[in-house]
Image (tube, grey):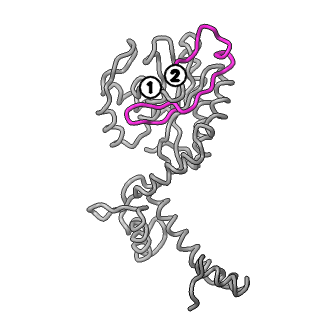
Amino acid sequence: MPPYGKFGSTEYLFCQGRSAVDENQNRTSAITSQTVLKSLDVLDCLAAARRPLSAPEIAKLCRMSRPTAYRLLTTLMGRGYVMVDEDYNYSLGTKILGLARVVLDTMNLPKMAQPYLHELSQLSQETAFMSILDDTKILYIAKEEGPQVQTSQTFQMRSNVGTHNELHSSAMGKAILANLPTDERSALIARLTLTRYTDHTITDRDALINELEQTRRRGYAIDDCEGDDWVRCVAAPVYDGGGRVLGAISIAGPAHRMTLEYIQQLSGDVIRVTQALSKQLGQVSAVAPQ
């Protein structure tokens, strides 16, 4: 067997002629590609299930033999892409989360969202926002003001990129909360301080849970003067490539213009835009998790 050069065996083969490289690639590509594809199938299966799966379940869902499933799972566990619990059920590992964060940083989520916010701000003539979950609050990451807002001397939204807002009293917060996995949502609600800001603010946990159920069923959230007496908002969730809620997009404006009837009209456009962004982020079906 020839010694490896600085860049490994490929450099050696290159020195022997391009045909040797082609021959080697032809001999190994089928095996390598099938292994990679099967590994990706396992990861896709675990992501779609949104619950831990046993090795036999994974083998059945991925249409592979049990020995193959065990071999792939062992390899993926060794690299941190899969983890196993005490019942020998498998789920995605923390390495996936790290990669997801790198992807989000690289693709510049606020920049991706801006065209969608511009569309909504032009359509509604109001202000469009995008936010993400940041511990027990939402963090505004993008904002676009409509022409009516830009020329107004009496009304402009106080919320700016980099500022926070509450989960329980904002449309985007409720859109995110409503579409989190049940256990995670319950744990987060238990940590919230349900501060009253107006007479419309929800301060009872059971009432908030009921509101979130309605939000999830209809596909969008409403802030009916719950954070400010003079502001109404409508928001819908944005999902990442794994079908997990990533953030939300909203339209906000003064209550005298953003009537509940107008919000209902705008809700379809907000949902359409969030589904389009979710699809761009890799969530092809753009369906909320159950």
The residue at which mark 1 appears reads as: 165
Q: Which image quadrant: the C terminus?
A: top left
Q: Which three-letter amino acid code belongs to the residue tagged 2?
A: Ser
Q: Which residues are magenta?
A: 131-159
On the image, the x and y values in percent for residue 287 come to 52, 44
Give the left or right position of residue 180, taking residue 249 as reference.
left
On the image, the x and y values in percent for residue 83 come to 36, 61
Residue located at (50% from left, 51% from top): 100
Magenta-colored stretch includes residue 144 = yes
Q: Please say if 16 is above or below 222.
A: below
On the image, the x and y values in percent for residue 106 come to 58, 48
Residue located at (30% from left, 60% from top): 85
Q: Nearer the viewer, residue 106 or 167?
A: 106
Q: SS class of the residue under badge 1?
A: strand
Magenta-colored stretch includes residue 25 = no
Residue located at (58% from left, 41% from top): 109
Give the left or right position of residue 138, taking residue 89 as reference.
right
On the image, the x and y values in percent for residue 96 come to 46, 56
Number of numbered tags placed on the structure image: 2
For the residues bearing labels 2 and 1, Cβ distance under 8 angstroms: yes
Q: Residue furthest bottom?
A: 1
Q: Which three-letter amino acid code belongs to the residue tagged 1?
A: Asn
Q: Which image quadrant: the N terminus?
A: bottom right
Q: Residue furthest left?
A: 86
Question: Badge 2: few (under 14), some or many (20 or more) residues near its Cα, within 10 Å?
Answer: few
Earlier-in-chain disc, 2 versus 1: 2
Q: CA distance from mark 2 to mark 1?
A: 8 Å
Residue 102 is labelled as: none
Q: Residue furthest front?
A: 6
Q: Nearer the viewer, residue 81 or 101?
A: 101
The residue at which mark 2 appears reads as: 159
